[in-house]
Amino acid sequence: MADKNENNSLNLEENMRALDEVIRVLEKGDLSLEDSFEKYKEGMELLLKCNNSVDKVEKELQILESEGI
């Protein structure tokens, strides 16, 4: 189970780094409107992945706590 959690953490960390990069590019303001929109969509997809990863970990922690582990 530790390997599974490590992989989930790495995915979350990778997605967060990618999201940070999207934000950096958007804040720079050098993109066309169309490219900005595509970057925005990419960022929203990454944000959803990050939120889903965090939600999954929270649920696993709640289960562990309820089991007294």
Image (cartoon, rainbow, N blue to C red):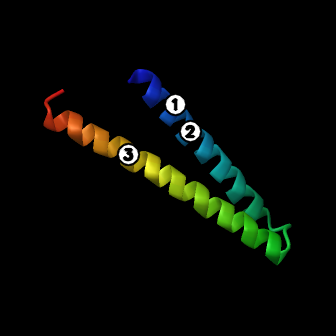
Percent across and percent down for residue 60 are 30, 39
Q: Are marks 1 and 2 in contact (CB under 8 Å)?
A: yes
Percent across and percent down for residue 47 are 55, 57
Taking 9 as reference, is 22 left or right?
right
The quadrant of the rendering that contains the N terminus is top left
Mark before the other along the chain sequence, 3 or 1: 1
Q: Nearer the viewer, residue 53 or 20?
A: 53
Report the Cα–Cα distance between label 3 and label 1. Answer: 13 Å
Q: Which residue is mark 2?
A: 11
Q: Residue at x 37, y 41 (%)?
A: 57
Q: Which residue is mark 1?
A: 7
Report the Cα–Cα distance between label 1 and label 2. Answer: 6 Å
Q: Residue at x 85, y 73 (%)?
A: 32
Q: Amino acid at mark 3?
A: Lys
Q: Amino acid at mark 2?
A: Asn
What secondary structure is marked by label 1? helix
What secondary structure is marked by label 2? helix
Percent across and percent down for residue 65 are 18, 35
Image quadrant in which you'd find residue 34:
bottom right
Q: Amino acid at mark 1?
A: Asn
Badge 1 crowding class, 10 Å Cα cut-off, few under 14, some 14 to 19, many 20 or more, is few
Report the Cα–Cα distance between label 3 and label 2. Answer: 13 Å
Mark before the other along the chain sequence, 3 or 2: 2
The quadrant of the rendering that contains the C terminus is top left
Q: Are marks 3 and 2 in contact (CB under 8 Å)?
A: no
What secondary structure is marked by label 3? helix
Q: Which residue is mark 3?
A: 56
Q: Are marks 3 and 1 in contact (CB under 8 Å)?
A: no
